[in-house]
C-alpha cells in the first residue's frame, strides 16, 4: 500500500449567499498517494474547482466555510493559520489553473513570476534562483529558456503559458500538484503535449496529482483512479480499470456514453437531459441525479443515498444503478451495444 | 520611440493651426476691443480713438489681422499687451512659473491623498474604512470647488490666519533666499490643498474600483497559490496593476490642473496665468487671451503625448513604434 500524501475526509465547502450558507462541496472523501494521478470528473458546476480551491484554501474567507479534514501528510491543513498555510501553498502543494493567459500577472516577466515562488520558500541566492528558474523552464519544454525568462506572458502562446504555469507550480518540488482543468483552454494537440509533460514530471518527482477535468478521454489516458462528482457529492469512485470496464452510477455511465466516438456508427450523440442543479435550489435529500433520469422509477432510488462498496476500492452512491437503463430521444429503452 | 514623438509633434501643427483659427474667431466675436475702455474717457476724442484703431489695424479685414497674428506667433511673437504695454510673452513668463508651481504641488497632494485612500478602501471594501472613504468621495463629487475654496479661504485664511489670503510670496522677503522659497510654499499650500481635496476623489474612486477588480483576478489567485503573504500580494501584484490606468492618466491630469487653476487663482488672488486670463478677458486684452488659450491648447496636446509615453513605459503590453 502506497503512502497517502493527501487525505480528504468529509470535506464540506459552503458559500455564503444572501446570509445563508450553501454546500458546494458536500462531504467529499478520497485520498491521493505518492506517484498517483487521481482524476476528479464531472460537468461544470459539480464542485470540482470549488474542491481544488478548498484544498489550497484560496476561497474568500468571509464568504466560505470549510469543514471536515484535509490531511497533508497527517497534518490537518483546514485548521492551521493563514501564515502556516502560506508555507504549504506553493511549497508542498502546487496548483495549475485553467486559463493560462489570465492566470499570469501581465506586468511581470515570466522569470520573475517563477522566481517569486523560490523567494518565499527557499533561501537561494539571486543567481541560484535564476539558474533554478532556467532549469525549470527547460524541464517544462520551453525551447529558449534564457529568452523566455525575460519575456512577458502576452508574448507567449497559450501552450507556452501553460508550461510556465506548470513550472510555477512545481518550482519548489511539491509532493502534490492540483491541476484544475489544465488543458481546457488549449487546442487538442497542445492538450496532449501538456498531459505528457505532467506525466513525465511525475515520473521524475513521484508527486501525487489531482487532475480536475470534464474530459473523460483525458482521464482514460493518464489517471490511476477516478472520482466522479455530481452536484457537490462523490457519486462513484474507483480505479480507471473499474470505472471504464464496469461503470455503475447512472451519471458515470451517461458521461461515458456522451463521449463522441469515431468508431461506433451511432446516429445520435448521447445527451444528458437537463442541467446540474444550482447550489441554492437543490433537493439535497434524495438522489441528486434523479431529476435527469426521470424514466427511472422513484423507488429505485435510496432515501438519502449513501456510498456503497461494490468491489474493493469501488464505491457508488445510491441504489438506482441497479435499475438504470438508457433511453433514446424518443423515450425507447436502448438495450443493445452500450455500457 | 523618438520617431513616434517626432511624428506626434508634426501632427500637432495642423491641430494647433485649427485651434488658432477658432481662438481668433472667438476673440473677435467678443463685444468691444482693447480701445473700448478708453472710449469712455471724455478727454480723448472719438476721432482720436478711431485713428488709434486704424493704426493698430483693428479695422482691417479679419484675414489680414489673423495673418499678422499667426505669422507673429510662428516667429515667437505673441504681440504686445494693451494693458501692460509690454510683450505678451513677458507678461505670461512673469506668471507661468507660479502656475506651474501651484499645479505641481496640487498634483503631488492629489496623489498623496488618493493612493492611500484608494488602496485602503479597495483592499478593505465594504468595511467601515471603505464606507468613510466612499462617503468622503460622494461629498467631494458633490461639492463645487469654488464654494469649497471660499470656505477654506475663510476658515484657514481669515479666521485662523494660518495661511496668507492672497499673492504668491510675501513682500517682506528678499528674492532667492530660503525665507523667500518658504514664503512661496506657504502661499501655495492653501490653494493647492483646497483643489487637491476635491479633485482627488476621482482618482480615489478609480483606484478603489481597480483594486477591487484586480484582487479577484486570476493572476492574484495564482500569486496567493504561491504562498505569498497577503500584504506582499498587494504590493507586488495588485497595486502595480491597479496604478496602471492612473499613471496613464497623469498627462491629462497635469493639463487639466494647469487649465483648472483659473478658478482657484482668482479666488486666492494668486498671480498666475489663470488669474491673468480672467483679468485680460475683462480688459479685452485679446493678445494676452489668445496667447494663453493657444498655450493651454499646446499643453493639452503635450499632455496626451505624455500619457501615451507613460503608458508605454509602465505597461509591457503597449509598445509605441
Image (cartoon, coloured by chain):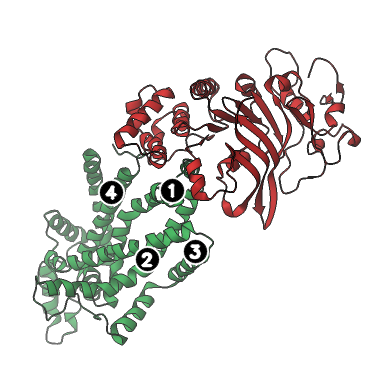
Residue position for label 4:
B305
Residue position for label 1:
B233
Say yes or no: labels 3 and 2 on the same chain. yes
Label 1, label 4: how far apart the Cα atoms are = 32 Å
Residue position for label 2:
B199
**Secondary structure under the numbered disc 2 in the rendered image:** helix
Residue position for label 3:
B130
Mark 2: few/some/many CA within 10 Å (<14, 14-19, 20+): many
Label 1, label 2: how far apart the Cα atoms are = 29 Å
| Tint of chain A | red
Estimate the x, y position of residue B73 in percent, counting from the top left. 15, 57
Foreground label between 2 and 4: 2
Asked if the residues shown at circle 2 and circle 4 are in contact, with their CB atoms under 8 angstroms apart, the answer is: no
Subunit bearing disc 4: B
Foreground label between 3 and 4: 3
Subunit bearing disc 1: B
**Secondary structure under the numbered disc 1 in the rendered image:** helix
Query: Residue at the spot x=30%, y=37% of the render?
Result: A126
**Secondary structure under the numbered disc 4 in the rendered image:** helix
Label 2, label 4: how far apart the Cα atoms are = 22 Å
Q: Is residue A189 above or below residue B236?
A: above
Estimate the x, y position of residue A321 in percent, counting from the top left. 83, 28
Estimate the x, y position of residue A115 in percent, counting from the top left. 38, 36
Amino acid at each position: 500500500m502506497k503512502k497517502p500524501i493527501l487525505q480528504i475526509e468529509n470535506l464540506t465547502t459552503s458559500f455564503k449567499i444572501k446570509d445563508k450558507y450553501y454546500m458546494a462541496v458536500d462531504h467529499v472523501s478520497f485520498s491521493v498517494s505518492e506517484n498517483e494521478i487521481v482524476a476528479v470528473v464531472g460537468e461544470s458546476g459539480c464542485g470540482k474547482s470549488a474542491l481544488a480551491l478548498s484544498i489550497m484554501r484560496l476561497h474568500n474567507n468571509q464568504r466560505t466555510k470549510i469543514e471536515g479534514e484535509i490531511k497533508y501528510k497527517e497534518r490537518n491543513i483546514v485548521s492551521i493559520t493563514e501564515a502556516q498555510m502560506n508555507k504549504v501553498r506553493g511549497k508542498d502543494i502546487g496548483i495549475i489553473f485553467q486559463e493560462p493567459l489570465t492566470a499570469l500577472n501581465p506586468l511581470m516577466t515570466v522569470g520573475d513570476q517563477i522566481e517569486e515562488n523560490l523567494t518565499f520558500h527557499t533561501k537561494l541566492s539571486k543567481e541560484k534562483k535564476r539558474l533554478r528558474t532556467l532549469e525549470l523552464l527547460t524541464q517544462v519544454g520551453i525551447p529558449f529558456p534564457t529568452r523566455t525568462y525575460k519575456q512577458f506572458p502576452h508574448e507567449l502562446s497559450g501552450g507556452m503559458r501553460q508550461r510556465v504555469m506548470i513550472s510555477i507550480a512545481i518550482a519548489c518540488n511539491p509532493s502534490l500538484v492540483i491541476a484544475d482543468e489544465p488543458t481546457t483552454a488549449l487546442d487538442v494537440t497542445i492538450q496532449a503535449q501538456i498531459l505528457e509533460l505532467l506525466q513525465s514530471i511525475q515520473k521524475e518527482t513521484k508527486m501525487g496529482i489531482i487532475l480536475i477535468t470534464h474530459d473523460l478521454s483525458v482521464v482514460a489516458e493518464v489517471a490511476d483512479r477516478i472520482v466522479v462528482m455530481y452536484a457537490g457529492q462523490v457519486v462513484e469512485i474507483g480505479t480507471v480499470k473499474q470505472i471504464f470496464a464496469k461503470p455503475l452510477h447512472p451519471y458515470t455511465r451517461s458521461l461515458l456514453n456522451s463521449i463522441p466516438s469515431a468508431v461506433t456508427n451511432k446516429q445520435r450523440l448521447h445527451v444528458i437531459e437537463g442541467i446540474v442543479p444550482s447550489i441554492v435550489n437543490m433537493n439535497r435529500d434524495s438522489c441528486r441525479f434523479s431529476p435527469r433520469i426521470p424514466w427511472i422509477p422513484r423507488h429505485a432510488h435510496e432515501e438519502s443515498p449513501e456510498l456503497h462498496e461494490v468491489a474493493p476500492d469501488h464505491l457508488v452512491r445510491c441504489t438506482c444503478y441497479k435499475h438504470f437503463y438508457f433511453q433514446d430521444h424518443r423515450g425507447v429503452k436502448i438495450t443493445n451495444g452500450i455500457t | 520611440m523618438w520617431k513616434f514623438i517626432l511624428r506626434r509633434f508634426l501632427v500637432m501643427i495642423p491641430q494647433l493651426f485649427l485651434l488658432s483659427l477658432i481662438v481668433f474667431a472667438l476673440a473677435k466675436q467678443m463685444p468691444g476691443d482693447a480701445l473700448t475702455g478708453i472710449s469712455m474717457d471724455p478727454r480723448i476724442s472719438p476721432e482720436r480713438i478711431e485713428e488709434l484703431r486704424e493704426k493698430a489695424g483693428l479695422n482691417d479685414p479679419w484675414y489680414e489681422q489673423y495673418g499678422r497674428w499667426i505669422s507673429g506667433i510662428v516667429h515667437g511673437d505673441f504681440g504686445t499687451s494693451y494693458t501692460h504695454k509690454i510683450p505678451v510673452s513677458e507678461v505670461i513668463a512673469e506668471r507661468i512659473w507660479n502656475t506651474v508651481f501651484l499645479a505641481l504641488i496640487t498634483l503631488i497632494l492629489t496623489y498623496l491623498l488618493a493612493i492611500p485612500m484608494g488602496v485602503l478602501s479597495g483592499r478593505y471594501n465594504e468595511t467601515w474604512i471603505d464606507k468613510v472613504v466612499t462617503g468622503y468621495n460622494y461629498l467631494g463629487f458633490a461639492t463645487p470647488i469654488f464654494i469649497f475654496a471660499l470656505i477654506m479661504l475663510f476658515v484657514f485664511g481669515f479666521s485662523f490666519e494660518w495661511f496668507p489670503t492672497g499673492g504668491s510670496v510675501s513682500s517682506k522677503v528678499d528674492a532667492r533666499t530660503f525665507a523667500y522659497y518658504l514664503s512661496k510654499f506657504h502661499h501655495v499650500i492653501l490653494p493647492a490643498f483646497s483643489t487637491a481635496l476635491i479633485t482627488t476623489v476621482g482618482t480615489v474612486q478609480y483606484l478603489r474600483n481597480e483594486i477591487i477588480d484586480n484582487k479577484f483576478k486570476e493572476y492574484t489567485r495564482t500569486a496567493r497559490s504561491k504562498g505569498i503573504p497577503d500584504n506582499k500580494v498587494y504590493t507586488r501584484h495588485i497595486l502595480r496593476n491597479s496604478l496602471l490606468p492612473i499613471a496613464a492618466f497623469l498627462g491629462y491630469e497635469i493639463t487639466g490642473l494647469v487649465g483648472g487653476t483659473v478658478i482657484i487663482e482668482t479666488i486666492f488672488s494668486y498671480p498666475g496665468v489663470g488669474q491673468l486670463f480672467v483679468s485680460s478677458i475683462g480688459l479685452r486684452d485679446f493678445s494676452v487671451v489668445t496667447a494663453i488659450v493657444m498655450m493651454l491648447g499646446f499643453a493639452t496636446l503635450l499632455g496626451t503625448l505624455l500619457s501615451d509615453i507613460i503608458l508605454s513605459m509602465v505597461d509591457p503590453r503597449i509598445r509605441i513604434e
